Amino acid sequence: MDQIYYNGRIHLMDQDRSVVSALAVKDGRVAAVGSDEEILSLADKGTQTTDLKGRTAIPGLTDTHLHLVIYGRSLSEVDLMGCRSAAEVVRRGQEYLKKHTLAEGQWLVGGGWNEQLFTDEQRVITRDDLDQISTEIPIAFARSCHHMEVCNSKALEIVGLVPGQQVEAGEIETVNGRLTGVLKELATRIIRPYYNNLTKETLKKHIVAGVDKMAAFGITTAHADDFINADPYDVVAAYQELKEEGKLKVRIYQQCRFPGPEELQEFIDKGYAPRSGDDQYRIGSLKLLADGSLGARTAAMIEDYSDAPGERGMFNFTDEMFDAMIQTAQKNDMPVAIHAIGDYTIGKCIDAIVKARELYPQDHLVRHGIVHCQITSAEQLERIARENIVAHIQPIFIASDSKIVEARTGERAKTSYSWKTLRDLGVPIPFGTDSPIETPNPYENIYCAVTRCDMDGKPEGGWRPEEKLTVDEAVEAVTVTAAWSAYQEDCKGTLEVGKLADMAVLSDDIFSIPPEKIKDLSAELTVVGGKIVYCK
């Protein structure tokens, strides 16, 4: 045996929910499980043994939707998460400039602010706020949802934006004939090339920073949406080189985003077929960004936002393009992962997936999914189940969205964020975090799933508590179901014999501690292919 882990409480997450004290590894896979005595007897001269010291271990965790490159990049930018006022946003920007020297022409970039957390005036920040940081350095600060960015006056000048300028499926906000600096949806793409120089080498730098953090959380697989603002072939090359260099600590299932069906088909024709690759780096699903966010009121709704008459958000495709993208994926046996938050967009997703399956039937069901799947009607929930569509949900969103969803959607809130209902209907609900939109911390994500509360434990008893999941259901979502959603149920998701020896050893027993304590958990050991890639 290559490695043996013993003296633990190892939850295999198999169908019987077996718990063993020891596990043996050979060639990166689970070779045997059982008691300490049974497994230690298999050791030979070259076996490495690790005492788990009674700690709880579970299969390695999977995040089924995040932006790894952007997350890795964000670790060196201005962190605006948790800001409680526009003044604090300004202060953090000023403090960053005091500690860091920017190169000539370099932009000051940050993200994570959310006006819903402001305790004084809950307003969107503007160019006037950012001008207090600097009028000489171009600045771009993304809202926590990343569907809105705000620029200062210098950035607007460099890019050459003008009042009244129009952009398809986006908005360059103007008030009283003056740019506010606020850019929404696809308008944000106008400024990103000015500060987002993603060469293959910078991609590798950001990926390494991101995967190191993933490993520290006990995440062993990430479904990464990385093609945005970078050449897809550079992204693939960066990952492959890091794999060869031994720097890719976690496994990657690549979500692939393209501007049109021609580019997608060309990518596949060049040899990047769905599920091609190996256990370390694999081509995954087609990612589509179909609408915006609830916080920015850009998620596309069937009826007006309850707190903004006349506004219904933005659907980012023509019907023809949306159908063409999904049909190209379907005929190539490629699952789609469609960002859809508003009920209008979710309806479009269901219709387009059904149509694509009818036009290009496969001999098996392509595991198409809706990412976020937030504002839904009861009828839509039933259709998602009936049409065998996956719901890639982000429970951690409830921490902030529970404060605004009723104001934004009114009666529609009563059938939204309906995780328990989806699961009871038979819909697979693998978890993701959408990091860096939210922290990639999987324990905070699970905490939100089982409590329906924010990090302060509010509202008491949870928002729409009837939709809470059990701890077992939540752990299943980030292990078993997550592996299934990527067609990898045969090699991961549980710690059964023959599967990849990916494991997270936790600071406490997730199955027995009070649910409100789950958010405080951490990974003390992370094991990928039997080898320790992180030790606290």
Image (cartoon, rainbow, N blue to C red):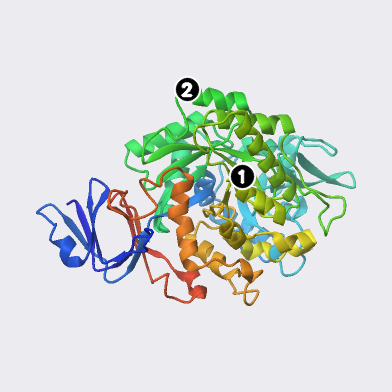
Classify 86 as above or below 143: below
Which residue is tagged 1? 387
Q: Spot the residue most to the left.
A: 45
Q: Nearer the viewer, residue 104 or 47?
A: 47
Mark 2: secondary structure: loop
Classify 167 as above or below 65: above
Classify 7 as above or below 191: below
Q: Nearer the viewer, residue 247 or 176?
A: 247
Q: Residue at x 59, y 28 (%)?
A: 360
**Mark 2 or mark 1, which has the lower sequence index?**
2
Residue 474's x, y, as percent? 49, 62
Residue 351 placement: quadrant: top right
Locate residue 316 relative to residue 386 in the image: left or right: right
Q: Residue at x 64, y 38 (%)?
A: 354
Amino acid type shown at disc 1: Glu
Residue 479's x, y, as percent? 43, 55
Residue 161 placement: quadrant: top right
Which residue is tagged 2? 270
Amino acid type shown at disc 2: Lys
Q: Nearer the viewer, residue 371 or 519?
A: 371
Q: Residue at x 60, y 34 (%)?
A: 357
Between label 2 and label 1, give the one nearer the viewer: 1
Residue 353's x, y, as percent? 63, 38
Q: Residue at x 63, y 63 (%)?
A: 398
What number is the disc on residue 150?
none
